[in-house]
Amino acid sequence: MEAYDGENDPGSHAYRGRTPRTEVMFGPPGHVYVYFTYGMWHCMNLVCGPDGRAGAVLLRAGEVVEGAELARKRRVSARNDKELAKGPARLATALDVDRSLDGTDACAAGETPLRMLTGTPVPAGQVRSGPRTGVAGEGGNGDLHPWRFWVADDPTVSPYRAHVPRRRRG
């Protein structure tokens, strides 16, 4: 996962304040913020800041532990089950997440189309952190936030990719 600090973070969609698109990021916590990227993929964040202050974590990957057959139908290009949800767009595709789930309370009890469940805690020594994938340094000075977190040696973790500035056509 990767953390985003809302209006304090140039890498966050909420950096420029509330918009109809980013409203969910301003709380309450536990809701899902879904966005469409590159004109073809959805990505999913879980809002985690206090109500009224934007903050979220991008869910970058996961292991499909139930419903693998259905996930395989959605992710036909996956070479094996470890690749079904290896990356934020692959995760959203495997779980059939799209903008219709934006704003869903993923912590609510009862019937809900998407729910976060308590898992098995990971030993602290297995948690790694580093710079976020594809996010430029704050203020353009090259500093990188160590706000990407993963479990060491987990085969479902997507690889780190450094930010590559876009070149404008002249």
Image (cartoon, rainbow, N blue to C red):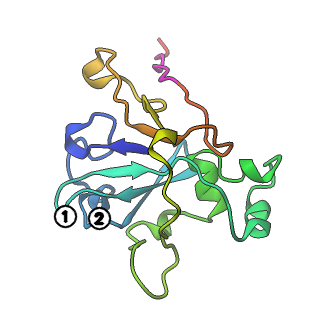
Query: Any mark on residue 29, and which?
Result: 2
Chief secondary structure of the magenta span? loop
Q: At label 2, which amino acid type do we have?
A: Pro
Residue tagged 1:
51
Up-down relation of residue 149 to residue 82 (above or below): above
Closer to the camera in the image, 64 or 41 = 64
| Place of residue 131 in the rendered image (x, y in percent of width and height, measured from the top left) | 42, 28
Closer to the camera in the image, 125 or 158 = 125
Is label 2 in a helix, a strand or a loop? loop
Can you name the residue that lies furthest to the top here? Answer: 170
Report, in whole angstroms, how far the alpha carbon at label 1 lies from the one at label 2: 6 Å
Place residue 31 in its image quadrant.
Answer: bottom left
Which numbered disc flags the more N-terminal residue, 1 or 2?
Answer: 2
Up-down relation of residue 165 to residue 145 (above or below): above
The crowd level at tag 1 (other Cα within 10 Å; few <14, some 14-19, many 20+) is some
Part of the protein shown in magenta: 162-167
With 73 as the anchor, is 158 left or right in this view?
left
Verify CB contact (< 8 Å) between mark 1 and mark 2. yes
| Place of residue 154 in the rendered image (x, y in percent of width and height, measured from the top left) | 64, 43
Is residue 40 in view from this perspective? no
Can you name the residue that lies furthest to the left here? Answer: 52
Can you name the residue that lies furthest to the bottom here? Answer: 110
- Which residue occupies 36% across, 44% down? 3
Q: Within the magenta stretch, is there residue 15?
A: no
- Which residue occupies 42% across, 66% down? 102
Place residue 81 in its image quadrant.
Answer: bottom right
